[in-house]
Image: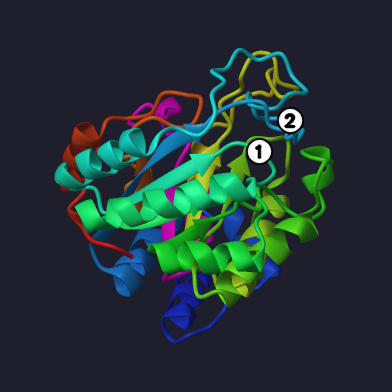
Amino acid sequence: MSYLNDLKLKIYEGYKVSGNEASALYGSEFNELLAAADEIRKKFCGNSFDMCTIINAKSGRCSENCKYCAQSVYYSAPVSEYPLLSKEEIVSSAVSNYESGVLRFSVVTSGRNLSEREISDLVGIYRAVGEKCHISLCASHGLLTYDHFILLKRAGVSRYHNNLETSRRFFPQVCTTHTYDDKIETIKSAQRAGLEVCSGGIIGLGETYQDRIDMALEIRELGIRSVPVNILNPIKGTPFEHNPPLSEEEILRTIAVFRFLIPDGAIRLAGGRSLLGDKGRKAFLSGANAAISGNMLTTAGISTEEDKEIINLCGYRLEKL
């Protein structure tokens, strides 16, 4: 029996793959690695596929210096700038997505955090969405406090999004206006308030595959099961605009190893998926079982209708994970 299959069977019995084992897995025979990751996904998650959409509800003028992001005030990338959208615009978008079969809807705002007025407005918006439809509500509003999370929870939000982005080691190469521990504290505060957490990162920032593994281990340690995997889409005017693109093989190896590390998770293809020639289809047969559909924050995505076709072709059914 091969090392890879032996490890897969141990995972079936509840074993947790170590960082060293994950590093060894990364160099496994490519097709065997992808096939084993898909088998682990089927074992723990069946054919359920979790699809969500997002709305860029407040754009630009962000005080943080994340080197991949067009919305930062530190860089010259062209980006739309506008304050918090109206209740009518956000509620209408949520209802439209719900009627098209989307299970989760996330309101995303730029900036380190929100003002008390913006929090109050969003509480009213989330409650209004809940009155109009039964879509699951997610929120992504930066480094909020425990008291803010309590308000969001009471308003109907079930999940909070806060990406770690990369490993603790590499994070200072990506952002210096807040810290890795700021993110960890935010995640733990959201969990303490009773919210689920969605947290992953971006690959292609210049990190090593070991950085990706370390990030996944941190996510697993935090008890997070919704793990977005973004592929850097270099944006002109940001410090990472000249980063070389990752190969499809490297992207798929990363996704497969994440499945070994978090066997029961929703490994969610997110930003940059449109860079893949098949729009993620092979990844959905190599360990990934969730996606953000539609447009991303500052880049184009893949339409919900097209995604539903891809999901059906892969043998999935839409269900919340």
Residue 249: where, in percent of width, then height? 50, 38
Mark 2 crowd level (few <14, some 14–19, many ≥20, 10 Å Cα)? many
Residue 167: where, in percent of width, then height? 73, 53
In the image, what residue occupies the spot 78% across and 47% down?
Answer: 171
The circle drawn on residue 111 is: 1
Residue type indicated by callout 2:
Lys
In the image, what residue occupies the spot 71% across and 63% down?
Answer: 184
Contact check, label 2 and label 1, Cβ < 8 Å: no
Q: Between residue 13 and residue 173, name the one nearer to us.
A: 173
Give the quarter of the figure containing the C terminus: bottom left
The circle drawn on residue 67 is: 2
In the depicted structure, whether residue 54 falls above or below residue 198: above
In the image, what residue occupies the spot 57% across and 53% down?
Answer: 200
The circle drawn on residue 77 is: none
Name the secondary structure under disc 2.
Answer: loop
Is residue 264 rendered magenta in the image? yes
In the image, what residue occupies the spot 45% across and 71% down?
Answer: 5
Name the secondary structure under disc 1.
Answer: loop
Disc 2 versus disc 1: nearer the observer: 1
Residue 155: where, in percent of width, then height? 41, 62
Residue 282 lies in what quarter of the image?
top left
Q: Which residues are magenta?
A: 253-279
Residue 189 lies in what quarter of the image?
bottom right
